[in-house]
Structures are given as C-alpha cells and as structure tokens.
Image (cartoon, rainbow, N blue to C red):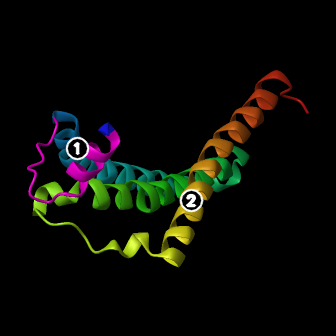
Amino acid sequence: MFHDNMRQSLLDDSTPYTHSPEHRFFTYVTPVIAVFGVVGNSVSLMVFLSKNMRKLSASMYLIALAISDIMSLVLYVLPEWLKHGEPLLSGYSWPPLLQQNGVCKSVLYNQYIARFLSSWFIVFFTIERFIGVCFPLR
C-alpha cells in the first residue's frame, strides 16, 4: 500500500516538489566545479605536453590522467547535472536524449571507461614513483 501511494505521488505532476538544500547545492556548485576542473586539467595538459616535461616518464602518466579527468567531467558530471540539476534552473526537464537505448549505453560505457582509467593512471603513476624513489639507479 505504501509503495503504491509513493509511486502515485512520484508520477503525479500536480504534487509540488520542494527542492532540498542538497539538490540546490548540486545545481549551483556542480557547474563551477566542472568548469574549474576542465580548465585546471587543460592547463595541466599544456604544461605536461611542453617540450621539457615530455621527456619525463611521469609526465606521460599525468598527461593521460589529465585527459581521463577531462573525459570524466564532460562525460559523467555534465550529463548528471543536465539530468538532475539543470531542471531546477530552467523549470523544465531536458528531452530524454541521454536515456535513449543506444545513447544511454554508449554514454554509460564511456563514463565507466573514463572513471576507471583515471583511477588506474593514479595507481600506475604511484608505482612508477615508488620504483623511481626506492630503486633510483635501475
């Protein structure tokens, strides 16, 4: 009985929905974090792609990390904000483009790839630095 009432209230458009402070925080702060993240990772990418930095092996890991972080921000944070945060600003929901069968699967796959690559590049960078510090002559 409770689940039926809850389902009906979720499907009923006449019921006013009050946005929680967390939802408002997500709506207004997420774009700021995403912009700073993309700009910061782009600057890091330019620095690590410079001629002097490309010679270092650690720079290759950090270049890959910056690219995967930008991909994570664009492919994961932006669609989540468009789906959950932007409707609070505009008052209407976006067309369900990201929820179509083929689009949803490919976006979800790319989101997982970008996030997994990001964490694994940190692991690889840490292992490379461990070897460089503990075995400097090898």
x then y, percent, for residue 135: 86, 25
Residue stretch rendered in magenta on the structure: 3-20
The residue closer to the viewer here, 2 or 22, is 2
Cα distance in 3D space between marks 2 and 1: 30 Å
x then y, percent, for residue 106: 56, 71
Residue 102 visible (yes or no): yes
The residue that label 1 is drawn on is 29
What is the total number of numbered labels drawn onto the structure image?
Answer: 2
The residue that label 2 is drawn on is 49
The residue closer to the viewer here, 79 or 62, is 79
Quadrant in the picture for residue 24: top left
**Going 18% across and 47% down the picture, which residue do you hit?**
28
Q: Give the residue at the far right of this rendering.
A: 138
- The answer to which of marks 2 and 1 sits earlier in the sequence is 1
Judge from the rendering whether residue 136 lies leftward or rightward of residue 107; answer left or right.
right
Q: Amino acid at mark 1?
A: Val
Mark 1: few, some, or many residues within 10 Å (few <14, many ≥20)? few
x then y, percent, for residue 128: 76, 37
- Whether 69 is among the magenta residues is no
Q: Amino acid at mark 2?
A: Leu
User: If the image is split into quadrants, where does the N terminus sit?
Assistant: top left
User: If the image is split into quadrants, where does the C terminus sit?
Assistant: top right
